[in-house]
Image (tube, rainbow, N blue to C red):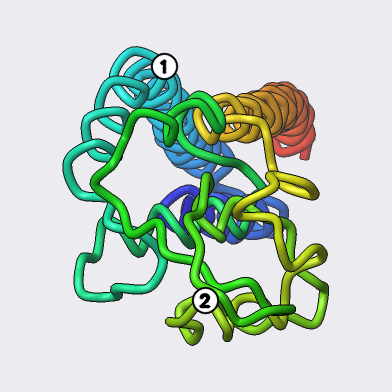
Amino acid sequence: MLAYGLCLYFVSIIGIAAAFTTRVTACFFTYISVLSIAVILQVVAIALVAVYNTMFEKNAEKFWTATLKSVYIGPYDRQETASKVWDSTQAWIGCCGVHGQKDFKHHNGWDRSWVDPKTSRKTTANLPVTCCRMKSSAPDITALITPQAFADHLVRSDCPVSKLKSSREGCFKKLSVLFGKFFKVFIGFAVVNMLCVIIAFVAAFIIMVRKRKLVGFM
């Protein structure tokens, strides 16, 4: 996007120069050359986004499933980076697991410890606390490392056990929707830019023809 912006910047300078110079043809072809580079950059960006979107749809689900089973250790241990990313993602976008809460039913490699805030008795969680909805005043979850610290910021303090007030949708589906929206917005932006480039090309061509006629007449 930076390269594309620089191209448009140079296009603007060339366009201004063309308006005040008698070397119309040279400026016109330079203008068209820079516009062509801008179009090529736009097409490359669209292709890369399309490829990435396809790769995400094909590979992300399998990769996330494998990662969840192999490295997720629960929300209290911050030593494993991939596990920390899982917790941050679940809390940030309001999702749970790859496909939903069922992912944690048969996965026993994570810390299921929980403390009932009302009785202070230790119990077993059915969901990671990061699958639970938190209050708007909750801090960054990476700063919370104990059941008691999490409980103070939950909408419902018994959520990890009861599953009430928890996120039910899987992260893969939620992120797929987000990426899909981004892809559509990007394509829309690219189409508008392409139309602007075409209009600029036609306008430059008309100005060149008229200016050449004017120079020839004078």
Q: Is residue 216 among the parts visible in the rendering? A: no
Residue 74: quarter of image:
bottom left
Neighbor class of circle 1 (other Cα within 10 Å; few <14, some 14-19, many 20+) is some
Q: Quadrant of the C terminus?
A: top right
Give whichever of 213, 89 is nearer the camera: 89
Instruction: Please state which amino acid type lies under the numbered disc 1.
Output: Glu
Q: CA distance from mark 2 to mark 1?
A: 35 Å
Residue 57 is tagged as 1
Image coords of residue 92 (percent x, y): 61, 58
Task: Identify the residue at image location x=48%, y=48%.
Answer: 4
Q: Residue at x 71, y 38 (%)?
A: 215
**On screen, 123 above or below 94?**
below
x, y percentage for residue 86?
Answer: 40, 53
What residue lies at 61% left-to-right and 42% top-to-bottom? 95
Judging from the image, what secondary structure is the residue with disc 2 in?
helix
Judge left or right: residue 73 versus residue 46. left
Q: Residues within 10 Å of mark 2 (few under 14, many from 20)?
A: some
Tell me the tag on residue 153.
none
Label ID, residue 147:
2
Res. 86 visible in picture? yes
Question: Is disc 1 placed on a helix, strand or loop?
Answer: helix
Image coordinates for residue 57, horizontal then vertical, percent = 41, 16
Q: Say above or below: 175 vs 154.
A: above
How many numbered dots are placed on residues in this image?
2
143 or 150: which is nearer to us?
A: 150
Q: Front-most of 44 and 182?
A: 182
Q: Are marks 2 and 1 in contact (CB under 8 Å)?
A: no
| First in sequence: mark 2 vs mark 1 | 1
Q: Quadrant of residue 180?
A: top right
Query: Residue 35: where, in percent of width, then height?
Result: 51, 35
38 up-or-down from 166: above or below:
above
User: What kind of residue is marked 2?
Assistant: Pro
